[in-house]
Amino acid sequence: MRETVFLCLEEVIEIHNDQIERYGGHPGIRDMELLKSAMAMPAAGSGENYLHTDIYEMAAAYLYHIVRNHPFTDGNKRASVVA
């Protein structure tokens, strides 16, 4: 079984910056703590028992929680889809 590798905070910030550069919008992080919270959700669980049972649910958790928490000034949906 492969080890699950999660995105790090810096990677998601890079994704967001790339999306703003490519498609326009206002750069910046509105709330760093909400971004950290969204980033933690796919890895939530106990030990190797994650709340999200497969890679697809984990990817959906990035999408849902970044959009829901709205941590960026602009481009939250774009960044979450790419993440």
Image (cartoon, grey):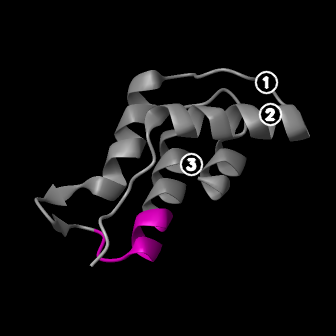
Q: Is residue 70 in sight in this rendering?
A: no
In the structure shown, which secondary structural element does the residue marked by tag 3 occupy? Answer: helix
Q: Which mark is residue 67?
A: 3
Nearest the viewer among 8 and 35 is 8
**Mark 3 residue type:** Val
Instruction: Write down the residue under mark 1.
Output: 26
Q: Is residue 51 magenta?
A: no
Q: Which mark is residue 20?
A: 2
Tag 3–tag 2 contact (CB < 8 Å):
no
Q: Which mark is residue 3?
A: none
Q: Earlier in the sequence, mark 3 or mark 2?
A: 2
Q: Quadrant of the N terminus?
A: bottom left
Nearest the viewer among 63 and 19 is 19
Q: Is residue 57 magenta?
A: yes
Q: Residue at x 88, y 39 (%)?
A: 22
Q: Residues within 10 Å of mark 2 (few under 14, many from 20)?
A: some
**Mark 2 residue type:** Ile
Q: Earlier in the sequence, mark 2 or mark 1?
A: 2
Q: Residues within 10 Å of mark 3 (few under 14, many from 20)?
A: many
39 over 42 or under it: above or below: above
Q: Is residue 26 left or right of residue 64?
A: right
38 over 28 or under it: above or below: below
- The part of the chain drawn in magenta is 52-60
**Mark 1 residue type:** His
Q: Residue at x 45, y 23 (%)?
A: 32
The quadrant where residue 19 appears:
top right
Residue 11 position in % (x across, y down): 55, 38
Q: Residue at x 48, y 41 (%)?
A: 69
